[in-house]
Image (cartoon, rainbow, N blue to C red):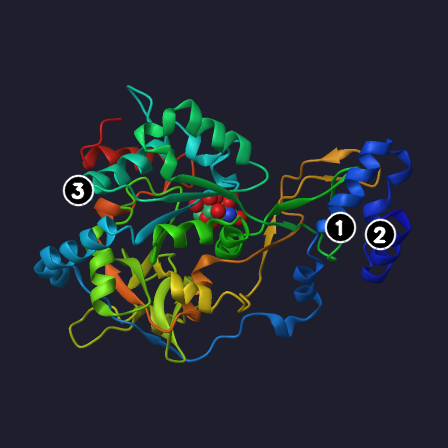
Amino acid sequence: MNFEETKTMLENKGQTQLLKYYDELDQTQKEELLARIGKIDFSLLEILDNPSMKQKRGDIKPLSALKLSEIDKNRDSYEKTGIEAIKAGKVGAILLAGGQGTRLGYDKPKGTYNLGVTKELYIFECLINNLMDVVKKADAWVPIAIMTSDINHDDTVSFFKEHDYFGYNSDYVYFFVQDMAPATDYNGKIYLEEKYKPAMSPNGNGGWFTSFAGAGLLDEFNKLGVEWMNVFAVDNVLQRIADPSFVGATIQSECVCGAKVVSKAAPDEKVGLLCTEDGRPSIVEYYEMTDEMMYSKDENGDLLYNYGVILNYLFSVKELIRIMEDKLPIHVVEKKIPYIGDDGVKNKPEKPNGYKFELLVLDLIHLMKDCLSYEVRRENEFAPVKNLTGIDSVESARELLVKNNVEI
Ligand code: UTP
């Protein structure tokens, strides 16, 4: 689009503030601004004017899990099925690493954070080490695709190269870049991050499959014969990836997906809970739960809504393809967004000053026909690094790594 076309389009959308500094820019910046505006997905903003587009909840009911006691009894059989699938090349892994990790306050990709105390131990390294356990057991490489964003892609790729993929076979490591979404003020006007650059941020982790397919990796994984994809977050350093028992249990259950869950630490713990909604699996956020739901118990005295998700899912590729065209709900989140003020000077706000728009991987679960809820031991499999100190932090993750005999 040339300047006139862009201006007309922005007038129609009420977003002409994006051209406010156009006349001050040099030719390259002018072209860059027009190109960037041309790529914006404005449809995400429609939700601000149409509250009816907001996610509406149906009839929520508890979903019980395949419990640890039962898993322990059948572990050999599950592992055998899982290892067979991995050996046959049917299992791939998707590492979601496109987030900005703002809570950690570290300006490089979160996976490059060094958790080591007496030696170097990076978050990415912990994850690769965990995956290597499975590779050794199955005697087969698991293809792993790493989702980055425009903001951290180059740093992530060069970090893996510099560290020789932490001993992983680089032929089985793929990278793809997720989409970006505009960031707006409270009136829905897109901010300028620079005079020649609209404010954009990664569009959440929910768009991973579309971006993965768009990058040609679905074809690549199809050629390898991948039928199951284990999707997980960068920040849980105790994450078991392509866990044979989880894979085997999901296959044996004949469900089209599986989700690792932990028993809630307290009835009001702030975790998303795996439930059913209108008969299909669904993840309900803690703030959507009524007190009654939070505290109700079953006949054994266990919490009815007891199983929290830890962002570790196994999806059937066929099912992901089936739902590919389905729309995910858009989540509007308040964030601190750096912007060029009316005086032309860049501001870095201390408090939230607008909205970002995100799609979430947890919403994919509700599009699935069914889902195996698979319980894991929190102390062995859940050590998220969200903050520097306190809950879910560098500190708590270090403690948990040590408890799990990882040298740090
Ligand atoms: P979080 O919800 O913790 O978000 O992401 P974040 O952006 O990393 O961190 P904060 O909230 O700013 O502190 C959960 C997982 O989803 C990935 C993250 O990298 C992490 O693995 N993610 C998140 C993406 O891949 N893309 C996104 O746009 C957002």
Q: How far apart are marks 2 and 3 (CA)?
A: 56 Å
Nearest to the observer: residue 272 or residue 138: 138
Question: Circle 2 is placed at which residue position?
Answer: 6
How far apart, in angstroms, are the residues tagged by discs 1 and 2?
A: 8 Å
State the mark number for residue 38: 1
**Residue 2, horizontal then vertical, whole percent:** 86, 48
Q: Residue at x 55, y 68 (%)?
A: 327
Q: Quadrant of residue 142?
A: top left
Residue drawn at x 87%, y 40% is 22
The foreground one among 368 and 360 is 368
Q: Can residue 370 be seen by looking at this rendering?
A: yes
Callout 1 touching callout 2 (CB < 8 Å): yes
Identify the mark nearer the N-term, 1 or 2.
2
Residue 240 vertical position relative to residue 52 in the rendered view, above or below:
above
Query: Measuring 36% from the left and 48% from the top, which residue is drawn there?
Result: 93
Check mark 3 vs ligand 1: CB closer than 8 Å? yes or no.
no
Left or right: residue 350 compared with residue 329: right
In three-dimensional space, the C-alpha distance between marks 3 and 1, rounded to whole angstroms, equals: 49 Å
**Amino acid type indicated by mark 2:** Thr
| Amino acid type shown at disc 1 | Gly
